[in-house]
Image (cartoon, rainbow, N blue to C red):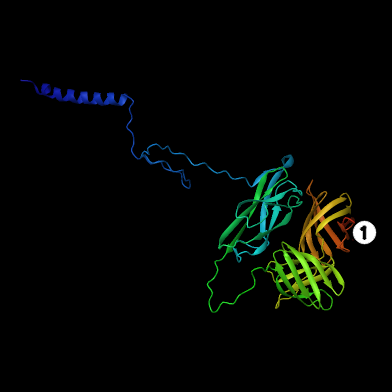
């Protein structure tokens, strides 16, 4: 009869064989395959979707290409930095409601925040969205680093109702696309006529359209009535006076005529559209306001805008000025200028690009073609337009 120890032997051997069998299975290198394993994703990160396990006959998944966006900055001529900053919608803020087919002028204020000096070959070009019957490209003009400029284009609202967005970007002289601005408008559906609806003839009206009370410092300027269609403005003032002009951004420039006399006008409308200020014949104050409002203060601002030939100590050469009402900025051969205008006097600061030095300036507009003045109080700084000559004296403390 087997002993108790002998009776336990078959069981021990069986267990040993089972353990050995498992060890062999693990040493063969086969690895159990997980089912529906979920890989955790880092917080805030969305990974591309993974194709499901279910096979699809005769088809292999093709990943969608990743679109690439042209950067907002770039490298300009000579290695300078191209960069632009949107400052404000001067006209037609985003989501402005416009009637079908309305012609309008969109103006953006942008700043050159790079190190490149934009020249006359720099353009604003249409890139995507709805072009709104606008041009494919327009020239921006010269803009120095740290200077701002108002860029305007003529557009037309579509005839079909809907929300429309168009995007324009800047193009440098070496072909680099950078920066960007947008226009967003809403064209409403035609309302169903009811007995209480009164037609409103404002479909072709711009901010200059309508009645104004004006002050030109002379008798009988009085009430003015303007009609704006797109960028064109016509109208009447006082007794038998007429106005003709063109809108560029916030500016209306053109001519006046009355009783055989005629001259120039240059006006800038405020952001709320109820007041404007400016001049006639470049130096004489002329401003206006809607009924119930008062004259802007100051009423008059002379026209320093445009190109000048300047004489100053160490900075003789060309100067270009951009003006928006009282505010002006520009470039001269050594750097940039900016400031404010009150009547025919401009005060502000100059900044030298090479070393960043800065100081005060004061200019006095003599007529539409000349100004004299100073920088630092004692150094001459005067200017004259092409076809004219330098004023005498150049220095005016």
Q: Is residue 189 left or right of 234 when viewed as pictured?
A: left
Q: Is residue 228 left or right of 366 when viewed as pictured?
A: left
Secondary structure under the numbered disc 1 in the rendered image = loop
Q: Position of residue 234 (x, y in %)?
A: 75, 69
Identify the residue shown where x is 73% and y is 65%: 232
Please state which of residues 290 and 37 is positioned toward the viewer in this rendering.
290
Q: Position of residue 388 (x, y in %)?
A: 91, 57
Q: Residue furthest right?
A: 392
Q: Report which residue position mark 1 lands on.
A: 391
Please state which of residues 55 and 53 is positioned toward the viewer in this rendering.
55
Q: Quadrant of the C terminus?
A: bottom right
Q: Is residue 368 left or right of 162 when viewed as pictured?
A: right
Q: Position of residue 290 (x, y in %)?
A: 71, 75
**Corner quadrant of residue 248:** bottom right
Q: Position of residue 224 (x, y in %)?
A: 76, 75
Q: Is residue 131 above or below residue 275?
A: above
């Amino acid at each position: 009869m087997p002993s108790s120890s002998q009776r336990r032997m078959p069981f021990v051997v069986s267990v040993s064989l089972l353990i050995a069998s498992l060890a062999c299975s693990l040493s063969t290198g086969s690895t159990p395959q997980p089912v529906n394993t979920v890989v955790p994703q880092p917080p805030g990160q969305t990974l591309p979707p993974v194709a499901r396990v279910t096979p699809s006959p005769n088809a292999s998944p093709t990943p969608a290409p990743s679109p690439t966006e042209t950067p907002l900055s770039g490298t300009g001529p000579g290695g300078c930095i191209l960069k632009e900053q949107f400052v404000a919608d001067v006209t037609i803020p985003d989501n402005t409601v416009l009637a079908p087919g309305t012609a309008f002028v969109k103006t953006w204020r942008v700043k050159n925040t790079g190190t490149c000096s934009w020249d006359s070959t720099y353009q604003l070009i249409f890139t995507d969205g709805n072009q709104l019957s606008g041009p494919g490209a327009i020239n921006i003009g010269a803009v120095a680093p740290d200077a701002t400029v108002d860029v305007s284009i003529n557009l037309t609202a579509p005839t079909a109702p809907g929300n429309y967005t168009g995007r324009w970007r800047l193009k440098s002289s070496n072909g680099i696309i950078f920066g960007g601005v947008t226009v967003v408008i809403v064209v409403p559906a035609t309302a169903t006529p009811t007995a209480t609806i009164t037609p409103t003839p404002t479909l072709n009206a711009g901010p200059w359209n309508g009645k104004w009370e004006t002050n030109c410092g002379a008798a009988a300027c009085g009430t003015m009535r303007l009609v704006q269609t797109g960028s064109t403005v016509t109208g009447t003032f006082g007794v038998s006076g007429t106005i003709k002009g063109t809108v560029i951004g916030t500016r209306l420039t053109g001519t006046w005529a009355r009783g055989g006399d005629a001259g120039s006008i240059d006006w800038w409308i405020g952001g709320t559209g109820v007041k404007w200020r400016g001049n006639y014949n470049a130096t004489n104050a002329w401003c206006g306001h809607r009924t119930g409002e008062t004259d802007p203060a100051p009423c008059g601002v002379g026209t320093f805008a445009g190109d000048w030939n300047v004489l100053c100590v160490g900075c003789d050469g060309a100067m270009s000025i951009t003006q928006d009402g009282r505010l002006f900025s520009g470039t001269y051969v050594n750097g940039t200028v900016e400031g404010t205008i009150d009547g025919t006097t401009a005060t502000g600061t100059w900044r030298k690009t090479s070393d960043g030095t800065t100081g005060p300036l004061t200019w006095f507009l003599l007529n539409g073609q000349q100004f004299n003045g100073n920088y630092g109080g004692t150094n001459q700084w005067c200017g004259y337009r092409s076809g004219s000559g330098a004023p005498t004296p150049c220095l005016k403390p």
